[in-house]
Image (tube, helix red, strand yellow):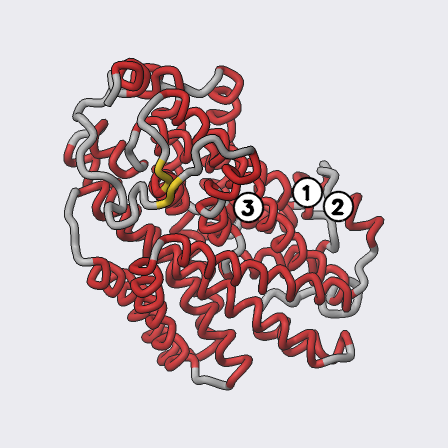
Amino acid sequence: MTGETQSSTARGWRLPAGSVSLPEVHGSIDIPAGAGFWRKLFAFAGPGYLVAVGYMDPGNWATDLAGGARYGYTLLSVIMVSNLMAILLQALAARLGIASGRDLAQACRDSYSRPVTIVLWVLCEIAIAACDLAEVIGAAIALNLLFHVPLTWGVTLTALDVLIVLFLQHRGFRYVEALVVGLILAIAGSFAIEMWLSRPDLAAVATGFVPRGGILRDSQMLYIAIGILGATVMPHNLYLHSSIVQTRKYADTTPSKAEAIRYSTIDSSVALMSALFINAAILVMAAAVFHGTGHQDVADIGDAYQLLSPLLGTTMASVLFAVALLCSGQNATLTGTLAGQIVMEGFINIRLRPWLRRLITRLIAIVPAIIVVAMYGERGTGPLIILSQVVLSLQLPFAVFPLVAFTSDPHKMGVFVSPLWVKLLAWSVAVIIALLNVWLLYQTFVGL
């Protein structure tokens, strides 16, 4: 480490940087020296799209469908605000990973006592398992809708992603990123066609992005709005992003790290705009097809699939919807397995063979899903997805507050510390997210 870098980022950490995050792919992607803006942007592009997957997963579909079916285009503004919050927090995660050489889990282990670190690790593992549960069920529902595969078998088949990730990561991390981007393009393409078929009111769509005070006054609308907010920012994405930005081979100097932070922020911001398009497209489609047509109560993924074809007059509508759901669920499980490895190695410094770690992660999600499907059938999957979002809401502040605290600390970040306006905005977002999630949990359990 050069003297320049030591003075900028190493002073406030209790321990020197230990083992690198995701060592099998750390610094494995070259950055062309002396290249122009677009070539360098392409070299840094990729991690943002792996992160964006978590913002368009099946866990978001129920709230987007319910919001569009019940309230038309009104809640588009909530999706936009949620996305802007996500862009800010993911930029902070990239800043932390590049500047400190630590992912968020490693930073927590370095800064907190052993008991606190263990508690944070357990909470994060529970959140990853809950998130994985929603993705597994979403992919299983899609397989059932498309190929009539029984839900139990569909849940089991999702475990094959372990083999896919292992194979692609062995070939190079770029292959993992390429697969994820390909699936995102398939989702985006499916919904672009869905929007063309549903022919939404474009003027109403535009006005839907303007925040309205009526959202706060209508308790039922506010509940769905907070559900959208609570399901948007995924805690495991903050750990994931702070790690995978380090797959780029930038130099260990202040100018090189500053460049890496700049390009990584552009990458994640652009990628998260694709998540904004997809989440907005789900709500727009639901608003155009179900709102005002006697189907305002549609919120179940299976019901939406069954109704799209007769309402739009073509079976393509339902097929594309299920294809997008399958791509969404499978994409999210791919990134979830990576997040699980990062969290275990970062918090408690225990390394397992990648196949074993991913198999454990998958089994934690598959076992409860199989039990619920076997006992309650398809009708039990909806409540299970909702429960998974509640668990995520519980864990979110335990990831957001440490992230904002670390990136606001000049002793830890040196010259890369967040500017004052970013600090104020980040702390405000952290408090708002925490309060809204507490309110959502109160509404969920008390029902007021």
Quadrant of the frame with the N terminus: top left
Q: Earlier in the sequence, mark 3 or mark 1?
A: 1
Q: Residue at x 51, y 47 (%)?
A: 232
Residue for point 22% across, 48% down:
344
Which residue, given by chain and number where applicable, does mark 3 sit on? 271
Q: Secondary structure at mark 3?
A: helix
* Residue 27 % position (x, y): 31, 41
Depth check: 56 or 190 in front? 190
Amino acid residing under circle 1? Ser
Could you tell me which secondary element the residue under label 1 belongs to? helix
The numbered dot on residue 77 is 1
Is label 2 in contact with label 1 (beta carbons under 8 Å)?
yes
Distance between the alpha carbons at the discs numbered 3 and 2: 22 Å
- Residue that badge 2 annotates: 208
Q: Which three-letter amino acid code belongs to the residue tagged 2?
A: Gly
Mark 3 in CB contact with mark 1 (< 8 angstroms): no
Residue 306, position as x, y percentages in the image: 64, 78
**Residue 431 in view here:** no
User: Tag 3: residue type?
Assistant: Ala
